[in-house]
């Protein structure tokens, strides 16, 4: 890496507001608030709305709709207008 062109990274705590989870990682982000971590050191604190702790894709809580239900809903809404081919 060339010196002097990369932003400075430092330890930062990210707090997921939806899952009330805390993550300590390195980041270039700046924060005005701080928090004392488990090791007794004070780190900048950044609040986020969604992280891997609360996002449905990562937690496996995403709704799954069966494809038959989608077909039935489509047919109820638009009906069968096409005639079957012979």
Image: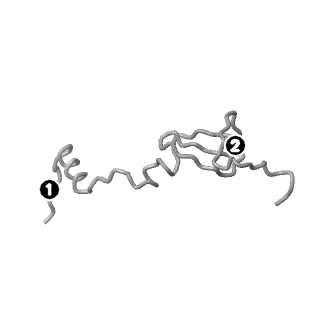
In the shown orientation, is residue 37 left or right of residue 9?
left
Q: Secondary structure at mark 1?
A: loop
Determine the image quadrant of residue 60.
Answer: bottom left
In front of the other: label 2 or label 1? Answer: 2
Kind of element beneath mark 2: strand
Observer-nearest of 15 and 61: 15
Q: Which mark is residue 62?
A: none
| Position of residue 82 measured from the top left corner of the image (x, y, whole percent) | 17, 53
The residue at 63%/50% (across/down) is 24
Residue pictured at 19% horizontal, 51% vertical: 72
Q: How is the image coloured?
A: one colour
In this rendering, position of residue 11 left or right of residue 83: right
Against 16, residue 26 (above or below) is below
Residue 39 appears at what percent x and percent y? 67, 50
Q: Which label number is shown at residue 43?
A: 2
Of the residues under marks 2 and 1, which one precedes in the sequence? Answer: 2
Check disc 1: other Cα within 10 Å, few if <14, some if 14-19, many if 20+. Answer: few
For marks 2 and 1, give the CA distance: 67 Å
Disc 2 to disc 1: CB gap under 8 Å: no
Q: Nearer the viewer, residue 28 or 77?
A: 28
Horizontal arrangement in the rendering, residue 9 relative to residue 51 (left or right): right
Q: Which residue is mark 1?
A: 83
Q: Position of residue 1 (x, y in %)?
A: 82, 60
């Amino acid at each position: 890496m060339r010196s002097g062109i990369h932003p400075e990274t430092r330890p930062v705590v990210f707090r997921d507001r939806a899952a009330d989870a805390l993550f300590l990682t390195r980041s270039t982000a700046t924060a005005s608030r701080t928090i004392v971590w488990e090791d007794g050191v004070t780190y900048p604190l950044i609040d986020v709305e969604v992280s891997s702790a609360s996002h449905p894709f990562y937690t496996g809580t995403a709704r799954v709709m069966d494809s038959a239900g989608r077909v039935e809903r489509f047919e109820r809404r638009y009906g069968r207008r096409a005639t079957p081919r012979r």
